[in-house]
Amino acid sequence: MLQLALTPRWLLLLLVLVAFVIATVLLGRWQWERTQSILDAERAAASQPIPILDAFPDRQPGQVPDDMPSESIGRPVIVTGQYDPGMQAIITSRSLDGEAGVWVVTGVPQPDGTVAAVLRGWLPDAGDAGSAVPSGAVEVQGVLQPDEPFYVDAPIDGDQTVVISSGRLARMWGAPVLPGFVVLQQERPPVDPAPIPVPQTVQTADVPFPLQNFFYAFQWWIFAGFGVVVYVRWLWIEAGREEEPALAVD
């Protein structure tokens, strides 16, 4: 096989193979980099805040969806409107940096009649001055989180409860509340005094991996390996054919 491989014909075929392997490896690498570029672009798009109602694309106008779309969990959103003084809930037994306190959740009615629940932040006590509902137009930028699934049968005591859920808030406020709640990160105009913003409870879900582009990259690398196998197999068969006449003469 070695003697045959060193003949001019097979040296030329080897050069063709080397060129083919280099080309397919580079094409696979290019496709892999394209896969990463698509991921980066989709992640950048997903990190841009969208209006709160756009996070529920299948919703009928004026109606509350049964659940939050999985792709909207952890999605940055914008809530515009006015806080409703009659729509505020105190979520008890919440700590921040090891200090006991409460969360303050306030409703922002939307143009279609639904209400977006905004977790404005943490306070050491429900009577703190920061719990006062701000007046006037507001723009909240935050992260959309799903309803809390625990303590579903916990009682409601006036404006106080131990869990955030759209159904519970809807009963407290007498209004259709969108699923989940928005964890406030920025607010315009700024409010002072105000609750201390809290970290989001559920991390943002990653965008789907572009499998098609990944398989394209993998396919090119398979072609490279296939080319090597074909070359070696072909060389082995040709070397065997050249040995047969010599064996017959012996």
Image (tube, helix red, strand yellow):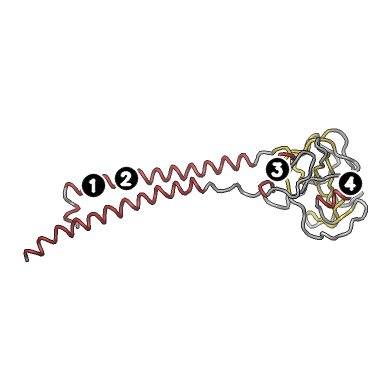
Q: How packed is label 4: few (under 14 Cα within 10 Å), some, or many (20 or more)? A: few
Q: Amino acid at mark 1?
A: Leu
Where 99 falls versus 14 (above or below)?
below
State the residue position of label 2: 20
Question: Going from the N terminus, do you reach mark 2 or mark 1 first?
Answer: 1
Question: Going from the N terminus, do you reach mark 1 or mark 4 first?
Answer: 1
State the residue position of label 4: 174
Q: Amino acid at mark 2?
A: Phe
Q: CA distance from mark 2 to mark 3?
A: 49 Å
Label 1's element?
Answer: helix
Label 2's element?
Answer: helix
Residue 58 numbered mark, or none: 3
Q: CA distance from mark 4 to mark 3?
A: 24 Å
Instruction: Check if mark 4's residue and mark 2's residue have beta carbons within 8 Å.
Output: no
State the residue position of label 1: 13
Q: Residue visible at 81% across and 41% down?
A: 114
Q: Residue visible at 60% across and 47% down?
A: 207
